[in-house]
Amino acid sequence: MDKMIEVKDLCFEYVEGSQTINHISFDIYKGEYVTILGHNGSGKSTIAKLLIGLLEKKSGSIRIHGYELNLENLYKVREQVGIVFQNPDNQFIGATVRDDIAFGLENICIPREEMDDLINTYASQVRMDQFLDHEPTKLSGGQKQRVAIAGILAMSPSIIILDEATSMLDPRGRHEINELVRDLKKEREMTILSITHDIEEAKNADKIILLNEGQIISIGTPQEILSQVDVLEQLKLDIPFSLKVSQKLEEKGFHIHKTLDMKELENQLCQLNAKN
């Protein structure tokens, strides 16, 4: 498989002598959905900014789709990566949804006569085609983030980074974006890196990178990482709802298989109910 992101022995510090990112290394492959999971202040958003060249590393190396991230390759790297930030209100340029998606296309010099088809295609893909003439300020948080993602998709990046993209949304908005990300992974085989502290979001990933105080604690599948209840609690992270239910049932004397999948948990509960 092709490596889309290669990070080797990366270090960064905001204040001299105080490491914010401390000798981390990881790889992300084409088509993977990877989550960097950590509490606030763990350094995960700093990694996102380092990956697109908004911050300059102290040492180590970053390669994006084969390009070493340096001044010479900066714009080539940024052509490969689209990023959705935390606050959807800070991402709008146009007076309408249509204008906002068009802004990115104008920046990469797409001819006017080709824009409408592209705008319609990507607005439809994120289920916002009925809102093209709406003002962005009148949309819900989840709708705003979907428009931001449409604008990025229209520019055809190889990688999408979601930097706490659901943290300011209500539960419905978070569900909308998490569902959209799953669809993008499945239908477009996008390489997606999600920066988050949301356990329910992380459990949908192919791989989790667990971060604390700028260091990688472990890398593994959601089942491997999120089943480490003691570690998560030590890092002040929540545990998945399905595991909480499993734990409570075990404490009550019910033997149940620990799972991250709510449907599997429901099936087990139905089986327990049938036996009793």
Image (spheres, helix red, strand yellow):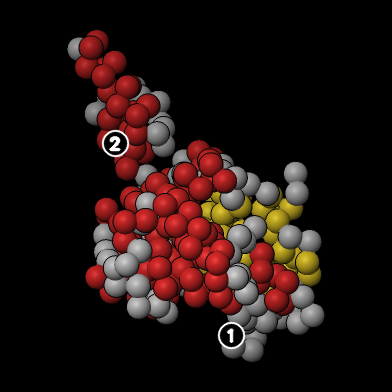
Q: Nearer the viewer, residue 248 or 10?
A: 10
Question: Relative to residue 13, is residue 172 drawn left or right?
Answer: left
Q: Are marks 2 and 1 in contact (CB under 8 Å)?
A: no
Position in image of residue 31 (x %, y %): 63, 46
Question: Is the residue 30 above or below the residue 42 in the image?
Answer: above
Q: Depth check: 241 or 123 in front?
A: 123
Quadrant containing the C terminus in the rendered view: top left
In percent of width and height, residue 54 lies at 60, 80
Which element carries disc 1, helix, strand or loop? loop
Residue shown at the point (34%, 37%) measured from the top left: 242
Asked if residue 131 shows in the view, the reply is yes
Residue at the image point whose x is 53% and y is 42% from the top: 187
Mark 2 falls on what kind of element? helix
Quadrant housing the N terminus: top right
Crowding at label 1, few (<14), some or many (≥20) Cα neighbours within 10 Å?
few
The spot of residue 179 in percent (x, y) is 40, 47
State the mark number for residue 123: none
Compared with residue 18, is residue 248 higher up or lower down, i.e. above or below?
above
Residue holding disc 2: 245
Outermost residue, front direction? Answer: 113
- Mark yes or no: residue 12 visible: no
Q: Residue at x 67, y 53 (%)?
A: 28
Amino acid at pointer 1? Tyr
Q: Which mark is residue 14?
A: 1
Q: Position of residue 119 (x, y in %)?
A: 47, 61
* For marks 2 and 1 on the same chain, the one whose residue lies earlier in the sequence: 1
Work out whether 156 lies above or below 94. above
The residue positioned 53% from the left and 54% from the top of the image is 35
Tell me where residue 13 sits by quadrant: bottom right
**Left or right: residue 2 compared with residue 234:** right
Amino acid type, callout 2: Val
Query: How far is the residue under mark 2 from the one under mark 1?
Result: 41 Å
